[in-house]
Image (cartoon, rainbow, N blue to C red):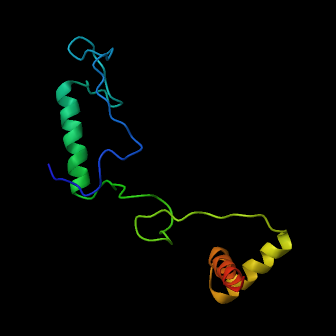
Amino acid sequence: MTEHEAAWPPEDMELVLDHDSEIDSDFEEIYDSKGNRITDEYVVDAIADVHRAIDEGRVPVPTGRGGRPSLTGEGTHSPKVSFRVPEELRERAKARAEKEGKTVSALAREAFEQFLRAG
């Protein structure tokens, strides 16, 4: 098995062995959606198949936070500031951002920076 750079399991996921499971694969018959019986060997093979798919790049593996790239620095969360504006101001901001080839967020960040520098 190949080791992966990303930590597994992700921090927000907890994997726990359930020794009190109510399923006893030696006595109960459980089937997947294709009608194959799920046995201990089936599970081992399925896990190996997932590892192969990851190794071959057929399954994306999250490497960090989702969303846009950080403005603070790689691997660091950028805080979010939000506020409400009148519709007319929003439309003016959209038009200005489009004219400058920017997003409204980029335009707002620049204006916020200029305001704070001036203060």
Frontmost residue, 24 versus 36: 24
How many numbered discs, if any?
0
What is the residue that sits farthest to the top in this orientation? Answer: 27
Left or right placement of residue 91 versus residue 113 in this view: right
Where is residue 31? Give x, y as percent: 31, 24
**Position of 24 relative to 45 (above/below):** above
Pick the quarter of the image with the C terminus: bottom right
Direction from residue 103 to residue 83 in the image, left or right: right
Residue plotted at (44% across, 64% down): 76
Q: Single out the residue that lies furthest toward the bottom.
A: 100
Q: Residue at x 82, y 75 (%)?
A: 89
Q: Residue at x 37, y 37 (%)?
A: 14
Residue 48 occupies which quadrant of the picture? top left
Residue sticking out furthest to the left = 1
* Residue 16 found in image quarter: top left
Give the residue displayed 31% in from the left and 16% down from the top: 20
As drawn, 91 above or below 58: below
Q: Nearer the viewer, residue 99 or 116?
A: 116
Q: Is residue 45 above or below residue 65?
A: above
Query: Horizontally, is 6 left or right of 71 in the view?
Result: left
Compared to residue 20, the image places residue 109 above or below, namely below
Q: Quadrant of residue 85?
A: bottom right
